[in-house]
């Protein structure tokens, strides 16, 4: 059975004009203005987060809450499950695409393509699943509102940014629909090509991000986190709880799981990996919402001691599926049952990104599913803190266009474009919903903080990095 979970079986050729008409007809089932209605889940945010933590490493759960309670934007970043439940309780377009599932502003950034060009795109696919297209868009626009407020931009400017985000997404869909399927498949956003066309503020942010990304290599990470042991063998420098060794038995089992991973990658990648040996393995804490899921770094060294660092990250059920109750196609359910959730994440990344890591693969360890990728391979996160409002506004447009390109890979592109239309009905509805959700998210943040103060949940002393 093929290990491609999100393939679509081609039964007949799609007619774009008929699909556009189907999309317009969908407005009668769910009028576009109804996308503005926020109907929260009957479950509280704290209840959902506690339930989500049940499968996680218990001693890391207090750290997850500490990171989420740092500020309202950090809370929003970590509460994708809460939003999925709230989205499921309300109206939807019914037009499904492969969604990222967590398309907030901090989940876009720079990374290296296989040809080493730097690409701007979505860069987190832990929650990738089939769902209504506007779920991703609402997550993005709400992050614009919350992020703008966190940065203390003027209220008028934030609303304009939110509106421009939806319009840029709509324009992006138009652009993609005007391209051939192959052209939009090959399309990728290489910011270095357009640096001279940007305003000074955006160019300055881009230059800083690109500079940081160029430095994020296995060799640099290796030098920062490794030291020589008594026998001259490189060993990880522990930094509990963020980075610490696993015991010998776990290390042995993880090495066996990595062999399983190598058996599933393309033959050319397997040949490259055959030149390396595993030097060390450690558990690492990552992100905000991901804290508590199991994540391991495998340090590999080549014949001239060149390092390659792989990250094996636990792949759990997508929040769009588990908390959003979005029905998943049978072929995906079958693939997950056979090969695990790592296949869903891996295939989601390959479909949604313009170009993906050649080392991407899957494995299982200790009865859990994982996906594997390079760690910090020229990955550059755009630093939002301190960004001028005008530059922030340009950045959110780039994110919206990248999201449109990702959604355009699904066969329902024409239906989606037909539903969205050419006026501001969807824009107004999405922005109204996002403002309402920003208020709910802020209230959820304060309620979680109150629960921590009351001792109902445990939090770490600080958000250790």
Image (cartoon, rainbow, N blue to C red):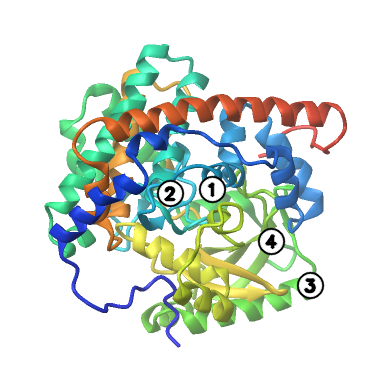
Q: Which residue is mark 4?
A: 282
Which is more N-terminal, label 4 or label 3?
3
**Disc 2 to disc 1, C-alpha distance:** 33 Å
Q: Quadrant of the C terminus?
A: top right
Left/right placement of residue 358 relative to residue 371 reads left
**Disc 2 to disc 4, C-alpha distance:** 20 Å
**Residue situated in front as seen by the camera: 260 or 145:** 145
Marker disc for residue 252: none
Q: Which element is circle 4 on?
A: strand
Q: Which residue is mark 2?
A: 379
Q: Which element is circle 1 on?
A: helix
**Disc 4 to disc 1, C-alpha distance:** 37 Å
Residue in the image at 30% along x and 50% along y: 26
Which is more N-terminal, label 1 or label 3?
1
Q: Which element is circle 3 on?
A: helix
Cβ atoms under marks 2 and 4 closer than 8 Å: no
Where residue 348 appears, as percent x and y from the top left, is 42, 63
Residue in the image at 42% along x and 83% along y: 271
Q: Quadrant of the N terminus?
A: bottom left
Q: Which residue is mark 3?
A: 248
- Residue farthest along the right direction in this orientation: 455
**Disc 3 to disc 4, C-alpha distance:** 11 Å
Q: Nearer the viewer, mark 3 or mark 1?
A: 1
Q: Quadrant of residue 199?
A: top left
Res. 377 in view: yes
Q: Which residue is mark 1?
A: 88
Cβ atoms under marks 2 and 1 closer than 8 Å: no
Q: Nearer the viewer, mark 3 or mark 2?
A: 2
């Amino acid at each position: 059975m093929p290990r491609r979970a999100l393939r679509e079986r081609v039964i007949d050729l799609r007619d774009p004009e008929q699909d556009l008409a189907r999309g317009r007809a969908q407005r009668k089932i769910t009028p576009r203005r109804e996308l503005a209605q926020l109907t929260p889940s009957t479950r509280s945010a704290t209840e959902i987060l506690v339930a989500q933590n049940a499968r996680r490493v218990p001693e890391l759960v207090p750290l997850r809450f500490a990171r989420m309670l740092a500020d309202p934007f950090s809370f929003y970043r970590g509460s994708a499950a809460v939003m999925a439940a709230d989205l499921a309780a309300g109206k939807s377009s019914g037009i499904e695409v492969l969604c990222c599932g967590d398309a907030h502003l901090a989940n876009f950034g720079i990374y290296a393509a296989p040809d080493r060009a730097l690409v701007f795109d979505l860069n987190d696919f832990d929650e990738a699943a089939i769902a209504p297209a506007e779920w991703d868009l609402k997550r993005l626009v709400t992050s614009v509102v919350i992020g703008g407020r966190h940065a203390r931009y003027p209220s008028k400017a934030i609303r304009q940014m939110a509106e421009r985000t939806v319009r840029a997404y709509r324009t992006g869909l138009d652009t993609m629909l005007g391209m051939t399927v192959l052209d939009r498949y090959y399309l990728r956003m290489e910011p270095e090509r357009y640096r001279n066309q940007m305003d000074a503020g955006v160019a300055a942010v881009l230059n800083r991000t690109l500079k940081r990304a160029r430095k994020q290599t296995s060799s640099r990470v290796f030098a920062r986190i490794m030291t020589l042991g008594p026998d001259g063998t490189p060993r990880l420098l522990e930094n509990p709880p963020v980075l610490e060794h696993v015991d010998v038995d776990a290390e042995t089992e993880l090495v066996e799981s990595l062999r399983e991973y190598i058996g599933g990658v393309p033959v050319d990648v397997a040949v490259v990996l055959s030149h390396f040996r595993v030097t060390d393995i450690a558990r690492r804490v990552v992100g905000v919402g991901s804290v508590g899921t199991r994540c391991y770094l495998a340090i590999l060294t080549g014949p001239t001691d060149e390092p390659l660092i792989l990250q094996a990250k636990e792949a759990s059920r997508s929040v769009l599926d588990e908390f959003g109750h979005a029905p998943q196609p049978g072929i995906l359910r079958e693939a997950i049952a056979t090969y695990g959730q790592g296949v869903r994440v891996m295939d989601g990344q390959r479909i949604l990104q313009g170009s993906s890591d050649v080392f991407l693969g899957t494995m299982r360890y200790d009865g859990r599913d994982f996906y594997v990728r390079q760690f910090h391979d020229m990955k550059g996160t755009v630093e939002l803190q301190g960004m001028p409002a005008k530059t922030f506004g340009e950045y959110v447009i780039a994110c919206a266009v990248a999201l449109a390109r990702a959604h355009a890979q699904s066969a329902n592109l024409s239906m989606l474009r037909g539903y969205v239309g050419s006026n501001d009905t969807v824009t107004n509805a999405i922005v109204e919903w996002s403002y309402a959700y920003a208020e709910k998210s802020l209230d959820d943040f304060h309620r979680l903080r109150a629960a921590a103060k009351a001792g109902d949940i445990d939090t770490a002393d600080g958000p250790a990095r």
